[in-house]
Image: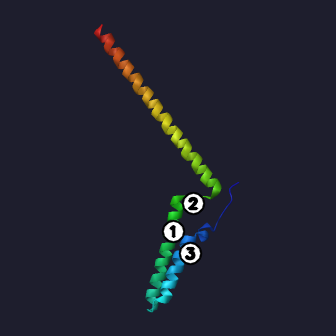
Amino acid sequence: MRTSRPLWFLLNLYGWAVIGMSVVTAVILDVDIGWRIAVVALGVIGYLAALLVDLVSGSNLGRTGVVRLARAEQENRELRSEQARLLGAIKEREAKLATAKTANSQQ
């Protein structure tokens, strides 16, 4: 059974580090509230970028997801090698047929 992780995005440490750095930067900056909101908004954008990188890299899949991904990649490699073998056999067959056809036409 598949376990549900509804709040998985809250476990991203890199995202929290980006938001934390933006909040610290907003506090350190001695400017008006508009610039502080802008800096925190950049932190939120950075958090979303960290989530996107996490999704693309597949690190949020969990242990079983990584195993399934590895099996799928292995099967993909096996299918590609089988495809290459079959294409090679087809080319050899076509070459033999072409040589047999030219031999029959010369007789």
**How far apart are the two marked residues, 1 and 2, measured between alpha carbons?**
12 Å
On residue 16, the disc is: 3
Name the residue rendered at 38%, 19% in the picture.
96
Q: Could you tell whether 12 is left or right of 34 in the image?
A: right
51 and 14: which is toward the camera: 14
* Residue at 49% over, 77% down: 43
- Reading the image, the residue beneath label 2 is 59
Question: Which structural element holds mark 2?
Answer: loop
- Which element is circle 1 on? helix
Q: What residue type is labelled 2?
A: Ser
Instruction: Please state the total of marks drawn on the protein image.
Output: 3
- In the picture shown, does residue 39 fall above or below 12? below
Q: Is residue 58 left or right of residue 38?
A: right
Residue 24 place in picture, x, y as percent:
51, 84
Residue 87, position in %: x, y? 43, 31
Residue 27 point in image, percent of width and height: 50, 88
Between residues 20 and 47, which one lies in front from this camera angle? 20
Question: For the residue marked with disc 1, what is the amino acid?
Answer: Ala
